[in-house]
Image (cartoon, rainbow, N blue to C red):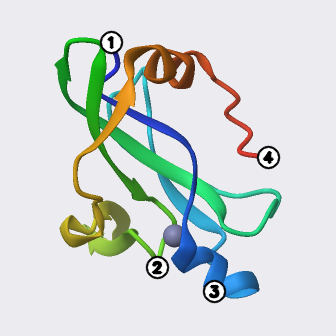
Amino acid sequence: MKTTMTRVGFCPKCKALGAEVSDEFVAFGQDSQLYKQIYTLYKGVSGYTPHLYQFISLVGDTIFYIRVCSMVGCGADIIEKIIDKKPTYKMVIYKNAWSSEMPMSLKDWTALEDFTDTGFEL
Ligand SMILES: [Zn+2]
């Protein structure tokens, strides 16, 4: 079971921002197990943005999880620092932007895990 994954979700804050939403977001790489910076290539349906989903616990056949919109300027930020004259980037997920714990059936969670369209083109 994946403990953190990047999948599309609905964000009312990004919906309200409309075209002012950033064109960058932070994704969690399944292979690298690291956060990485990604530029969106296409702005799809308003309000549907990349989110990080984080597994908390399994009780019976119900998953409890938290999620956060990972658009830069909404739930995440990318900080550039110059170290040894080279730019380095630190991915930041705002702690207070994470949702409270929410339930989802194990079946739905598994379907979310199996959905691996990484184009984020809704
Ligand atoms: Zn958002």
| Disc 2: CA contacts within 10 A as few (<14), some (14-19) or many (>=20) | some
Quarter of the rendering containing residue 60 = top left
Please name whichever residue, 4 or 64, is drawn nearer the observer in this view of the structure: 64
Q: Which part of the image, by quadrant, shows the N terminus? A: top left
> How far apart are labels 3 and 1 at the CA level?
34 Å
Select label 1 or label 2 by which is in front: 1
Residue at image point 57% right, 15% down = 114
Q: Nearer the viewer, residue 67 or 92?
A: 67
Residue at image point 29% right, 22% down = 62
Pointer 2 or 4: first along the chain: 2
Q: Is residue 66 left or right of residue 68?
A: left
Helix, strand or loop at disc 4?
loop
Q: Amino acid at mark 2?
A: Gly
Circle 1 residue: 1
Q: Which amino acid does the dot numbered 3 rest on? A: Leu
The image shows residue 79 at horizontal and vertical percentages of: 34, 73
Q: Position of residue 92 (x, y in %)?
A: 29, 64
* Mark 3 C-beta closer than 8 Å to ligand 1: yes
Which residue is the site of mark 2? 73
The amino acid on which the numbered mark 4 sits, given as a three-letter code, is Glu
Q: Is residue 76 above or below residue 27?
A: below
User: Which residue corresponds to mark 4?
Assistant: 121
Q: Is disc 2 placed on a helix, strand or loop? A: loop
- Mark 1 belongs to which amino acid? Met
How many marks on residues? 4
Mark closer to the chain start, 3 or 2: 3
Q: Residue at x 54, y 25 (%)?
A: 112
Please name which of the two marks, 3 or 2, marks the residue nearer to the observer: 3
* Tag 1 secondary structure: loop
Disc 2 from disc 4: Cα separation: 20 Å
* Mark 3 vs 1, N-terminal side: 1
Which residue position holds label 3?
Answer: 17
